[in-house]
């Protein structure tokens, strides 16, 4: 039951943080942090994959609803939620038996950094590609992806350091 409360709180907290706070932050006029991707990183691996994909889709769709963005957040979040296990196998060298004991923040920082950065960049590239949907604005897509990825990553690592449980 406590995992259900944790996942529900994480879902609602990230939704309201993104919709009511972070969507109103436009650093230098066009850089916007998308911290709701943290849902993919904090969701436990040992839970059912279909439920995780459904919740990721619903979180993205909820943000699309409030942002009036037509499904681009839902698709990009669902995509990185789907490929998450691939990168856990590649970067952390984990197998299905290791998933029960896997904790992202007990791993080496370099591996965690690479994992987080790769998924954030993929998410942002898909998001901005779908938002622009043109090859004429490809440099804008790359620049927005780069700058927003850096801003989101900094906020993610600061937030995860602040809210990490002390043992």
Image (tube, grey):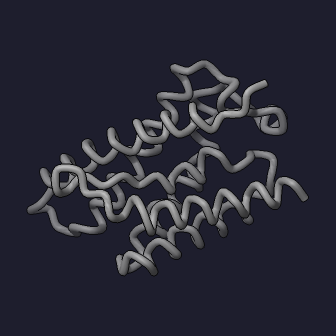
Residue at (65% x, 67% y) in the render: 55
Q: Between residue 148 and residue 79, name the one nearer to us.
A: 148
Q: Is residue 110 above or below residue 4?
A: above
Q: Position of residue 118 (x, y in %)?
A: 44, 38
Q: Quadrant of residue 51 in the image? A: bottom right
Q: Position of residue 166 (x, y in %)?
A: 73, 27
Residue 36, above or below 149: below
Lateral position of residue 19 relative to residue 124, left or right: right
Image position of 82 (left or right of 71): right
| Quarter in which the C terminus is drawn | top right
**Considering the image in quadrants, where does the N terminus appear?**
bottom right
State the image quarter where residue 86 is shown: top right
Point 50% across, 56% down: residue = 36
Q: From what the image shows, is residue 81 above or below residue 116?
A: below
The residue that appears at 35% across and 61% down in the rendered structure is: 127
Q: Residue at x 56, y 59 (%)?
A: 14
């Amino acid at each position: 039951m406590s995992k259900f409360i944790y996942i529900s709180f994480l879902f609602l907290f990230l939704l309201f943080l993104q919709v009511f706070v972070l969507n109103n932050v436009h650093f230098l006029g066009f850089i916007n942090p998308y911290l709701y991707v943290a849902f993919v990183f904090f969701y436990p691996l040992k839970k059912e994959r279909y439920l995780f994909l459904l919740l990721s889709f619903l979180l993205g769709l909820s943000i699309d609803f409030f942002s009036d963005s037509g499904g681009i957040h839902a698709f990009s979040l669902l995509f990185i939620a789907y490929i998450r296990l691939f990168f856990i196998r590649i970067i952390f060298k984990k197998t299905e038996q290791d998933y029960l004991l896997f904790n992202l923040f007990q791993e080496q920082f370099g591996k965690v950094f690479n994992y987080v950065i790769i998924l954030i960049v993929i998410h942002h590239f898909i998001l901005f590609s779908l938002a622009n949907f043109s090859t004429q604005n490809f440099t804008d897509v790359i620049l927005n992806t780069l700058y927003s990825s850096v801003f989101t990553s900094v906020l993610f690592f600061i937030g995860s350091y602040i809210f990490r449980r002390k043992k």
